[in-house]
Image: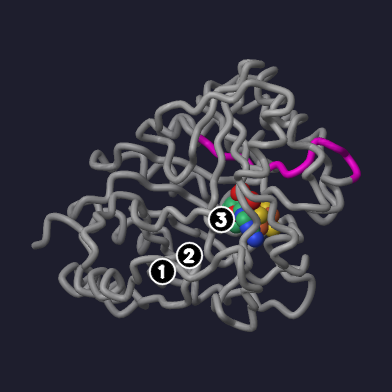
Amino acid sequence: MNNKLVDKFGRSYKYLRISVTDRCNFRCKYCMPQHNFKMLSHQDILSYEDIIFIVKTLTEVGIEKIRITGGEPLVRKNISYMFEQLGKIEKIKDLTLTTNGSLLKKYAKVIFDSGVRRINISLDSLKDDRYEYITGGFNLKHIIDSINYAKSIGFNPIKINVVAIKGFNDDEILDFCDFAAKNSFNVRFIEFMPLESSIEWKKENILTGKEIIDIISKQYEVKKIDKNKYSGPSEDYLLSNGAKIGIITPISNHFCNSCDKLRLTADGKLRPCLLSNYEVDLKPAIINSDKELLLKLINDSLNLKYEKHSVDCSENNSKNGKYGRNMFEIGG
Ligand code: SAM
Ligand code: SF4
């Protein structure tokens, strides 16, 4: 059996993001189209046993970090069970979650008890009306309370993911820096990516990592700090107000050469690149719990991966099915 997942460009893979559902209780405008989107049917969704089989097999060939995402992962029925089972797999060195935060009061404790310590929570505005607008009607105060509840349970670090969009929240960059300093959260600004959504993606909407740093530099000293093993694609900075922030630039300065990520969709497709529309269906191997076939399919998917994706700021990356799926179906 292979003992490492390495692609033809020499990149080795240690990180699996698992979308456990495409369902979501939010309707974020940069993530979901407003109309005409189809959800997966119940029978297409991997069972928890299927997911655990895939994870156990992948940890035997080098995967050691798992992130649970969605849709909104915490809306899936009996999600506590899955965290408990994954928490028992010794070869997983880092089990993490990305959530919109809305159900943390219900699940934070059991997730923490399963061994999760690091969580990412999406929060794109600190203004009530904007938060309500971008999420499709959700209440900012409830989310801030939930984030503080998660902090009180002991999650650390708590990373706040902010999709930076010109014309929406570009005037809140400094507010987020103050929010990070005041609460000891690590705020990470992510460039807006062009998957299907109900805000039309245009290059004019991208607030680039460089523009974000320029805004911050006018107010604070910005010192780049060394990446740590949890930085992922983020470039990290310490500000003179004490805030730790991260900048993630998939569009203006891609990080494909250091990509160590695979993505599993809720319907069992392995997607080796977020921004390229190819996937390998793992279901034929799952049906018979066939490990050898599973590893073959996983390697097939690595062979499909290009050296880098082709999305950038210079073209209008027209959608029209180019990415095959919406962000809520892949998990970010
Ligand atoms: N529901 C969870 C949440 O919102 O955190 C997890 C799934 S969500 C698809 C994962 C991440 O993708 C979130 O941080 C979200 O902000 C980000 N995301 C969604 N659409 C995006 C886009 N068009 N560009 C950049 N990031 C996006
Ligand atoms: Fe749901 Fe997360 Fe997408 Fe918002 S970003 S619609 S919370 S999946």
Q: Where does label 1 land, which residue?
A: 271
Horizontal placement of 194 versus 52: left or right?
right
Q: What span is colored magenta in the figure?
A: 119-129
Q: Earlier in the sequence, mark 3 or mark 1?
A: 3
Whether pointer 1 and pointer 2 mark residues with C-beta atoms closer than 8 Å, the reply is: yes
Amino acid at the residue labelled 3: Ser
What separation in Å lies between label 3 and label 1 (alpha carbons)? 22 Å
Name the element at disc 2. loop
Name the element at disc 3. loop
Q: Judge depth for marks 3 and 1 and give the one in front.
A: 3
Q: Where does label 3 land, which residue?
A: 252
Q: Judge depth for marks 1 and 2 and give the one in front.
A: 2
What separation in Å lies between label 3 and label 2 (alpha carbons)? 15 Å
Q: Quadrant of residue 299?
A: bottom left
How many residues crowd mark 3 within 10 Å: few (<14), some (14–19), many (20+)? Answer: some
Which residue is the extreme one toward the left? Answer: 1
Amino acid at the residue labelled 2: Leu
Along the line of sight, the residue nearer the viewer: 254 or 61 = 254
Above or below for 268 versus 332: below
Along the line of sight, the residue nearer the viewer: 332 or 256 = 256
Whether pointer 3 and pointer 2 mark residues with C-beta atoms closer than 8 Å, the reply is: no
